[in-house]
Image: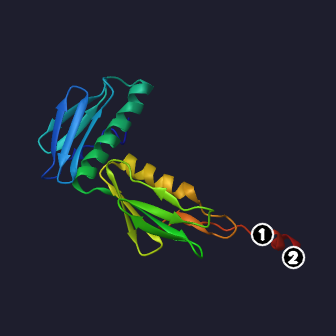
Amino acid sequence: MSRIGNQIINVPTGVDVAIEGTEVTVKGPKGSLSQNFHQDMTVTLDGDSIKVSRPSDESEHKAFHGLTRSLLANMVTGVSEGFTKELELVGVGYRVQQKGKGITLNVMLSHSVDIQPADGAELEVDGNNYIKVTGIDKQVVGQLASTIRRVRPPNIYTGKGIRYAGEVVRLKPGKSARRA
């Protein structure tokens, strides 16, 4: 029994869903997303709800059942509300500047790092230390946020670096803690 795959996806008003074989297209106020799914999964539209069903209880079909439902739910949420990831820069001298559609990071490297957004994502800078990544595709937003964080991940001894907003970085004691 798939707990995720059996859940029904409610389609909000203003969102149109078109199913053509294995390809599903979702259009909403923020944009349009289209994706092909596994040929064994059956996606049906009943009024304002989408249901995903599988042909058998094989392990492969069970895996694709939950995956298909999650991807469809993310598409519906993306075109209606959108997705946002927030990052913060922690450290003395760490700052970010908006440069056209992209950003420039100064994080105590020998050079500044320029990052351009991927298609379907936007970068916005709040102050000197906050970055907001927004878009309609959850995968693109998450990948871009991960790319930015990878420039200077948080240091486990000092806590300096680029981290997700609300991320808790556990600091390790240094050498001096062992001597005591």
The image quarter in which residue 6 lies = top left
Q: Position of residue 98 (x, y in %)?
A: 40, 66
* Image point (18%, 49%), residue name: 28
**Residue carrying label 2:** 180
Which numbered disc, 2 or 1, marks the residue that appears first in the sequence? 1
* Image point (56%, 67%), residue name: 168
Dot 2 lies on which element? loop
Dot 1 lies on which element? loop
* Image point (48%, 58%), residue name: 114
Q: What's under tag 1, amino acid-wise? A: Gly
3D distance between C-alphas at marks 2 and 1: 11 Å
The quarter of the picture where the C terminus appears is bottom right
Q: What's under tag 2, amino acid-wise? A: Ala
* Image point (67%, 68%), residue name: 171
Residue 139's mark? none
- Label 2: few (<14), some or many (≥20) within 10 Å? few
Identify whether 103 is placed above or below 137: below
The one of 145 and 117 positioned closer to us in this rendering: 117
Q: Position of residue 68 (x, y in %)?
A: 33, 36
Comparing marks 2 and 1, which lies closer to the viewer? Answer: 1
- Label 1: few (<14), some or many (≥20) within 10 Å? few
Identify whether 61 is placed above or below 10: above
The quarter of the picture where the N terminus appears is top left
Which residue in the rendered view is the most extreme toward the right?
Answer: 179
**Residue carrying label 1:** 174
The one of 86 and 72 positioned closer to us in this rendering: 86
Q: Position of residue 120 (x, y in %)?
A: 31, 49
